[in-house]
Image (tube, grey):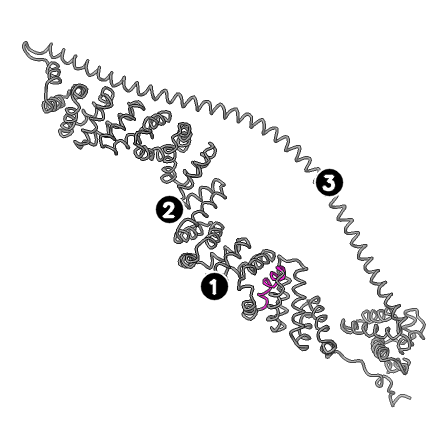
Amino acid sequence: MERTAQTARLSPLKEGLPPEKRVFAEDLRGVFLALGVSVRRYAARRHMDPSTVTRYLGGERVPPWDFVAGVLADLREADSPVTFEAETGLRSLHREALKCHRSDSEKQTLQDRLAEADEETRRIRTRQRALEEALMDRTQRLAEAHGRCRQLQVDLEGQRIARRSDLQLWQGEFDELENECRDLEQQVGYLREALAVARAELIAAEEQCHHLEAQLEQAQDLETAPVGRISLMAVLEETDRSASVAELITVVADLESRTQRAMASELVASVSRSREVQEVAVLLAGLQNAGLHAHAEAALPALVMTRSVEETCALIVNLYHAGLDEHLVQLLRASVQLHTPRDIAVLVRSLHASGLREQAVTLLGAACATRPLPDVVPMLTWLAGTGLDGTVASAIDAVAVERTVHDIVTLSCSLTEAGMHPVKSALHTAAATRRSAYDVAALAEALSRAGLHRDAESVFSATQNQTIEHLLALVSALQAMDKHHVATAVVNHAIVSRPTADTQVLITDMHAMGRHQQASEALITALQSAPPADLSQLLDGLDRAHPGATVLLERAARTAGYKEAAAVVAGLERNGLAEHARTVFTCTVRGRPTGHAAWFLIHLNQAGSAFTGSPFLVAQAQSGPPAGMAPLLLALGAAGLHEELTCLLQSLAYRDAEEIVLLLKQLERLGGATGAEREAVGNHIMTTTAAAREVPYQVVLVLALEAAGLSGNAAALVSAATASKGRSFTDALRKERFKHHQRVFSRAFWQRTDPHVE
C-alpha cells in the first residue's frame, strides 16, 4: 500500500517524448522506486528542488549523470545494488537521451571529459609522488653505493700495494729458487761425471785389491809350501798367459770350489782385458754354461773401461751370436753408465753396421732416457747425417716415455737450438701417442709457455688420433686445466675427422660421464657436419645406447643456438628424418624463450622448412589442445610471420570456446614475451575468430572470456565482431546478457489503481 502511494505521487511520463528519453526515464523511475522513498524526501536529502526531481523522473528533462550516480550510490548503501551490466546499460541509455538535446549532450560530454581529466590529474599526481619518493630513495641508495665504492677503491688500492710487495717478494724468491735449481742441475751434472770417474777408480781399486790379495796368497803359499812346490799365483799367471779357454774355465771352477772367489774373478777380468775378443766371448759362454756367470758379470765393467769402443762392439756381436743375452744386457748397461756421449754414439753406429739394430736402439734409448740432458743432444748430433734416422726415431720413444714433461720441454728447446727438428718432431709424436692424456695436455701447455706454439699444436694433432678413451681423458684433463675452448676444439676435430661410429661412442660416453653440456654440443656439431648418408647411422647408433637419441636431441635443443638448431632441423628434414626433426623443433619452440624461438622460426622459414608451412601448422592446430600452441603462436608473432600465424589461428578458430579461453590463459602465463607481444597475439586471435565464426559462437566466447577475467580479450572480440557482424551481434550479446535479469514493470502496471482504494 505504501509503495502504491509513493508511486501515485510520481508524475506520469510526459506525452510525446522521444523514444530515447522515454526508455531512459522508465529505467530511471524503476531504479528510483527501488529506494522506497518519496520524491520530496529524496529532494530534501540531496538539497534539490522537488520539482526538478519530478521533471527528471517524468522525462521532461534529462538529469546530469551525477544525479543518476547518486541514486545508484544510495541503492548500494541500502544493500540493493544494481549489477554492473544494469549500470552500464543505464549509462548507455543516458547518453542516447542526451543526444536528443545537443546542448545537454555537449555539456555532458564536457562534464565527462572534465571528470576523466580530473581522474587523470589525480593519477598523475599520485604517480608523481611515487616517483619523487622512488627518486629520493634511489638518490640515497646511490650516495651510499658511491660511498661503498670509494671505500672499496681505497681497500683495493691498499690490497694492490700489499699484493705488489708480496709479488715482488715472491718474484725474488722465485728467481732465487730458479738460480738454485740451475746451480743444482750443474752440480748434478758434475756429480754424475764425478760418479762415473769414481766408478772407474773403484773398478781400478778393486782390481788392485784383487791383485794385492793374489800376491798375499802367493806369499803365504811360498812360506808354507815345501821346497820345489810351484806357487798358486805363478800357476795363475801362467794360466792367464797360455791356458786355453777350457783350462781357464777349469781353473776358475777350482778356485770357486776352494773359496778363492776374488782370485777367480781377478783371473776372469785379467783374461778379459788381455785376450782376443773372440776368446773372451767363448770364455764368457763357457762360464755361463758352467754356472760361473757371476765372475763374468763382475768382469764386464772393467772390460768396458779398458777396451776400445770397437772391441766392445765386437764383444757384443759375439755375445749376441752366442746367445748370452744376460751378459749382453749387462755390457750394454755398463756402456750406458761408463762411456762418454761420443763413445756411445760411435758404439751405436758400430752396432747398427754390424746388423744389431735392436741393440743399437736399446743402447741409444737407454742413454737418452738416463743420461743427463746435456749429454743427450751431443749424442744425437753425432748421429745426425749418418743414415740412422730410423734408429734415432725408435730410440727417442724411450725419452718420450721415461722422461718428465719438464725434461721433454727442455730437450725440445735444445733440439730447436741445434736445428734437429725431425728428432724433435719424433719426440713430440712419441709423447703424444704414448703418454697419458693428462701428460699430453701438460706437455702442450708447457710447450706453449716455452714459445714452441707450433710444437704444441703438433702434439695436439698427434694425440687426437688416439682411441676414444684417450680423447675423453684428454678432454677431462683440459677441463680440469680450465682449457674449455681447447677441449671443445678437440671434440669438434674428432667429430669431423673420425668415423660415425666413433662419434656415437664419444657422445654417449660423455653423457654417461655426466658431461651433458659437452655431449649436447657434440651432437649439434655432428648433426651439422656429418655427411647425409651418415646421419641415419649416427641416430640409430645413439638409439641403441643409453639414454637414446630422443633424450639427447631434446637436451641438445635446450642449449643450442637458434641458428644451429634451425640448421639441424633443416638438415634432418632434408634427409628424411622427420621425427627427429620434429623433436628438435618442439623442444626449441616450447622450451626456449620467445625471442630465441622467434629467431629459430625465422631461420627455418628462410630455409624453406615444412615446419613453417600451412600443412604442418594446420595439422598442429588439429592434433592437440589449443593451449599447447601458445608458445608457437607467440614465437610466430614475435618473428613477424603473420601469414603463418593467421593460417594457424584460422584452424584454431573452430575449436570450442572453452579451449580458446584456456589458450588465452596460457598466453598470459608464458614468460619470455612482452605484454605488447601477448596482447598483439590475443587481438589477432579475436580478429580471426570474429571473421571465421558466426554470431552465436562469438556471443558464447565473449561471455566465457568475461567470466574468466579476460576482459581485454573480450573487449577486443566485441569490437571485432561488431565491426564484422554489426547490430546483429550487439543485439544477440545484449539479449544473452540480460535474458536472466528481472525486467522493470511497464508504465501501465504503475499507473493502475487498486479497486479497493478510493
Relative to 234, residue 313 above or below: below
Tell me the kind of residue under disc 1.
Glu
- Which label is found at residue 298? none
- Which label is found at residue 579? 1
The reply to whether the magenta stretch includes residue 690 is no
Q: Earlier in the sequence, mark 3 or mark 1?
A: 3
In what element is the residue under mark 1? helix
Q: Dot 2 corresponds to which residue?
A: 467
In what element is the residue under mark 2? loop
Relative to 248, residue 584 above or below: below
Looking at the image, residue 70 sits to the left or right of residue 305; the answer is right
Q: Position of residue 226 (x, y in %)?
A: 6, 10
Q: Find the magenta span and give its range.
A: 626-639
Tell me the kind of residue under disc 2.
Thr
Image quadrant in which you'd find residue 395 = top left
Tell me the kind of residue under disc 3.
Ala
Is residue 48 visible in the rendered image? The answer is: yes
Q: Position of residue 415 (x, y in %)?
A: 39, 29
Q: Dot 3 corresponds to which residue?
A: 143
